[in-house]
């Protein structure tokens, strides 16, 4: 059993807007952030969940070397919702060396390298100002967070494709349980780039229209970009009515295929079972499941198999991909935030763009969001390489 | 905090497996830098073996070697993969295609570009559904991977294999990020003592100490030029089979210090 951790504060930026309030409003109203992609990154038509304003907000000053779209987005998220103030308070309580940084990303600043390759000189060299270490390197986002927050504890980046920012929760919980940290920042960022857009197109899983999770006529994914961060610490006197606990993580590997899920969702089921065991909860105690639900034919079907085998059709569930798109390496953090908001503000999020449910899928899928008391929520994240992670969140009281 | 080391795998320039490298690392035999010879892994079916990229081949080879003496089942063992940058050839190829007029990517190239590609192939090859993570911490990736693996062993009370590796980027990325060769290392770490254990590792985060260096200039050069080879001082202590303390590079302001106590499993 895992000892629960309190989410002291959290922040996020998605195509729905910057900060928690924008997400709450959109999740309640069923507003989607997906729009036709106007970028010149790709030679085909699709919808994306793009975050506006990143082009006009370079990172300057002492941190200028970090400047790239992924780090701009990460920094924007850190600056929302009083997050940096909460970190400063935790630093005062515990000391800078006692706070860990466990960030996730799949794209990192790869978009910067794409641009550098387009701007190679006649001899084939990359531009002189290209800063691999602080933009492209997968660790750069954790390094940025550690610098911005003035921390000197352990840090690393987890990069397990679309499960990355879910698995960081498990790492943080272990480091706190081991007594190495008193608090941890978890989360991460992922940005739209040519590699992922063209890569998923090559795999034939990109929809032209906004993605329609669990729809009978779903045609694939819409890619989004996002960043989100959480400050975790042991429960204590600072917990209030609105505090949400992170109460368990379950990790598994499919051991099946590099880019396709196990057809019966075997790995997904294992991850959910392990999360329930870690939190000491029974399936019947879960009030809402935020599905991975990317809107591919196979992915949704595999996850439905797994969810139905554990929960039957008794538990409301939905995918948030119709809201903010599939934010890949950031999806774990985004959907953890959506679960926390559902608990705090009392609603089951719906599924924009999903119109007609696939009748072969058997879980209790919620298309139209509704007010509801949520005490315990589960969030699923599954990635390439068969990397699976389920997280559980619950009301503190 | 303590973990027991149960198995080692190694593959680097002029370092052909743990057993063959023992006298070199112990200082009894000169180090001669040579190519990194990756043993052909029989873990993957032939068609997958052909398509596998260099990082995957190295990871699978050192991983398999580390289990040979460990008496553990890789299918039931959690894994932590650590690399400073993933597969260089794959990234370079994708960047070149995307910068060209024809931006058509190969789906296989794309899935091989994810940082956790080795973890995925390891799971498929071994039928391992146990938890598996893939980390990056720039030059400190080995230490970060060790921390994650050792903390998992301690808090989850399970055996964990750490597999750390790095390969070179081709030009032009190699100028922005020079990595001086291909290197892989694997350690099977357990929270419980077994008679077969090779060593006891008492470890701590250390903001004071500087990283230990290698006595032999060739090995010291290797340590510096490949991030995964930052583990060499630990391997040297293990090879000498005498109790010693060693500090490995992690972050600018934080190192990883290990007190190594050899155990009888190493003499067997």
Image: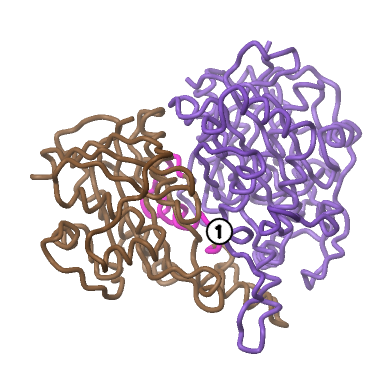
Chain colours: A purple, B brown
Image quadrant assignment for residue B167: bottom left
Q: Residues within 10 Å of mark 1 (few under 14, many from 20)?
A: many
- Where is residue B87? Give x, y as percent: 49, 65
Q: Is residue A289 left or right of residue B8?
A: right
In the image, is residue A396 part of the stretch drawn in magenta?
Answer: no
Q: Is residue A96 left or right of residue B78?
A: right
A75 or A317: nearer the eye? A75
Which range of residues does the magenta coloring cover?
B112-132
Q: Quadrant of the C terminus of chain A?
A: top right
Foreground pick, A325 / A18:
A18
Please say if B257 is above or below A140: above
* Residue under the image location 74 percent in, 47 percent down: A226
Nearer to the camera, A69 or A153 = A153
Question: Residue A317: in sight, yes or no?
Answer: no
Badge 1 marks a residue whose secondary structure is loop
The picture places residue A177, in percent across and down from the top left corner, at 47, 24
The residue tagged 1 is B114
């Amino acid at each position: 059993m895992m000892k629960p951790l309190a989410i002291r504060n959290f922040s996020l930026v998605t195509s729905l807007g910057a900060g928690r309030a924008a997400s709450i409003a959109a999740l309640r109203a069923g507003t989607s952030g997906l729009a036709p992609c106007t970028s010149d990154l790709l030679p085909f038509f699709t919808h994306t969940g793009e975050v506006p304003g990143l082009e006009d907000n370079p990172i300057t000053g002492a941190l200028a070397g970090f400047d790239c779209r992924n780090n701009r987005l990460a920094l924007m998220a850190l600056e929302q919702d009083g997050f940096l103030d909460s970190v400063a308070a935790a630093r005062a309580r515990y000391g800078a060396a006692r706070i860990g940084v466990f960030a996730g990303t799949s794209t990192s600043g790869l978009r910067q390298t794409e641009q550098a390759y387009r701007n190679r000189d006649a001899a084939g060299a990359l531009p002189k100002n290209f800063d691999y270490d602080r933009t492209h390197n997968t660790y750069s986002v954790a390094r940025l967070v550690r610098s911005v927050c003035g921390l000197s504890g352990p840090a690393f980046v987890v990069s397990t494709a679309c499960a990355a920012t879910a698995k960081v929760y498990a790492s943080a919980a272990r480091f706190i349980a081991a007594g190495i940290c008193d608090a941890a920042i978890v989360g991460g960022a992922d940005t739209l780039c040519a590699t992922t857009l063209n890569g998923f197109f090559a795999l034939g899983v990109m929809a032209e229209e906004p993605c329609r999770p669990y729809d009978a006529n779903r045609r694939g994914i819409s890619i989004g970009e996002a960043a989100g961060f959480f400050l975790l610490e042991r429960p204590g006197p600072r917990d209030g009515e609105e505090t949400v606990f992170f109460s368990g993580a379950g990790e598994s590997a499919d051991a099946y295929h590099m880019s396709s899920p196990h057809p019966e969702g075997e790995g997904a089921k294992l991850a959910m079972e392990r999360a329930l065991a870690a939190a000491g909860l029974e399936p019947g105690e879960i009030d809402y499941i935020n599905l991975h639900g990317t809107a591919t034919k196979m992915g949704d079907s595999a996850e439905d198999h797994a969810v139905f085998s554990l929960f039957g059709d008794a538990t409301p569930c939905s995918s948030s991909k119709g809201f903010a798109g599939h934010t890949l390496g950031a999806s774990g953090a985004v959907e953890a935030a959506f679960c926390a908001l559902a608990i705090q503000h009392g609603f089951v999020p719906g599924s924009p763009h999903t119109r007609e449910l696939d009748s072969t899928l058997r879980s209790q899928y919620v298309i139209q969001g509704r007010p509801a008391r949520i005490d315990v929520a589960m969030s699923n994240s599954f990635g390439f390489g068969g990397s699976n992670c389920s997280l559980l969140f619950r009301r503190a009281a | 905090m303590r973990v027991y080391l149960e198995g080692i795998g190694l593959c680097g320039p002029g370092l052909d497996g743990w057993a063959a490298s023992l006298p070199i690392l112990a200082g009894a035999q000169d180090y001669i830098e040579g190519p990194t010879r990756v043993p052909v892994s029989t873990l993957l079916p032939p068609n997958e073996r052909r398509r596998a990229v260099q990082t995957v081949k190295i990871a699978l080879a050192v991983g398999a070697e580390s289990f040979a003496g460990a008496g553990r089942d890789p299918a039931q063992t959690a894994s932590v993969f650590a690399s400073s940058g993933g597969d260089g050839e794959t990234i370079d190829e994708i960047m070149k295609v995307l910068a060209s007029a024809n931006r058509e990517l190969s789906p296989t190239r794309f899935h091989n570009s994810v940082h956790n590609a080795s973890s995925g192939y390891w799971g498929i090859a071994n039928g391992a559904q146990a938890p598996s993570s893939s980390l990056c911490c720039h030059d400190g990736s080995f230490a970060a991977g060790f921390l994650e693996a050792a903390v998992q062993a301690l808090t989850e009370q399970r055996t964990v294999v750490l597999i750390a590796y790095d390969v070179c980027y081709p030009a032009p990325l190699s100028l922005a990020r020079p990595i001086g060769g291909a290197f892989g290392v694997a350690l099977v770490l357990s929270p419980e003592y077994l008679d077969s254990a090779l060593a006891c590792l008492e470890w701590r985060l250390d903001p004071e100490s500087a990283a230990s260096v290698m006595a032999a200039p060739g090995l010291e050069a290797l340590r510096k030029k490949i991030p995964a080879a930052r583990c060499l001082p630990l391997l040297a202590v293990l090879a000498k089979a005498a109790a010693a303390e060693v500090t490995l590079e992690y972050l600018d302001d934080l190192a990883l210090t290990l007190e190594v106590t050899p155990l009888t499993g190493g003499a067997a």
